[in-house]
């Protein structure tokens, strides 16, 4: 699936290798790619914004948990991503 990032109003954040590796290792790349472009970009920006590696890893874990569970985005209900 190719996500269209052309309508983003914020700068696009490149995905760090450790995030890509974690998504692939957990089998969640598909769930990530199914999310709208703004969510993908927000998750990456939020993770990268952290100064400490410990905080980056904590945020990454939260993103992975939300993708696995479905129905939640940034700790808010997100019906469009709910798992069937």
Image: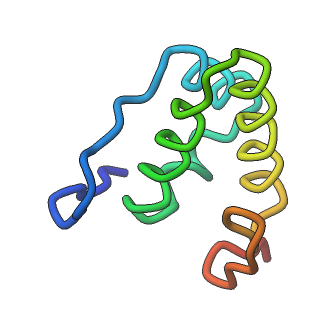
Q: Position of residue 56 (x, y in %)?
A: 69, 26
* Residue at 49% in and 60% down: 39
Residue 75 or residue 71, whichever sits in front = 75
Is residue 9 depicted above or below 55 in this figure? below
Which colouring convention does the figure follow?
rainbow
Q: Position of residue 82 (x, y in %)?
A: 74, 76
Is residue 66 depicted above or below 75 in this figure? above
Residue 44 in the figure: left or right of residue 12: right
* Residue at 18% in and 67% down: 7
Residue 77 or residue 2, whichever sits in front = 77
The quarter holding residue 28 reads: top right
- In the rendered image, which quarter contains the C terminus? bottom right
Q: Position of residue 13 (x, y in %)?
A: 35, 37
Residue 32 or residue 77, whichever sits in front = 77
Is residue 22 depicted above or below 69 in this figure? above
The quarter holding residue 64 reads: top right
Q: Position of residue 5 (x, y in %)?
A: 24, 55
Residue furthest left in the image: 6
């Amino acid at each position: 699936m190719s996500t269209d990032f052309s309508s983003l109003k914020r700068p696009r954040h490149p995905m760090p290798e450790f995030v890509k590796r974690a998504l692939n290792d957990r089998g969640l790349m598909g769930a990530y790619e199914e999310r709208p472009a703004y969510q993908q970009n927000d998750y990456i920006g939020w993770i990268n914004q952290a100064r400490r590696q410990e905080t980056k890893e904590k945020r990454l874990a939260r993103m992975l948990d939300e993708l696995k569970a479905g129905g939640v985005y940034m700790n808010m209900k997100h019906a469009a991503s709910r798992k069937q």
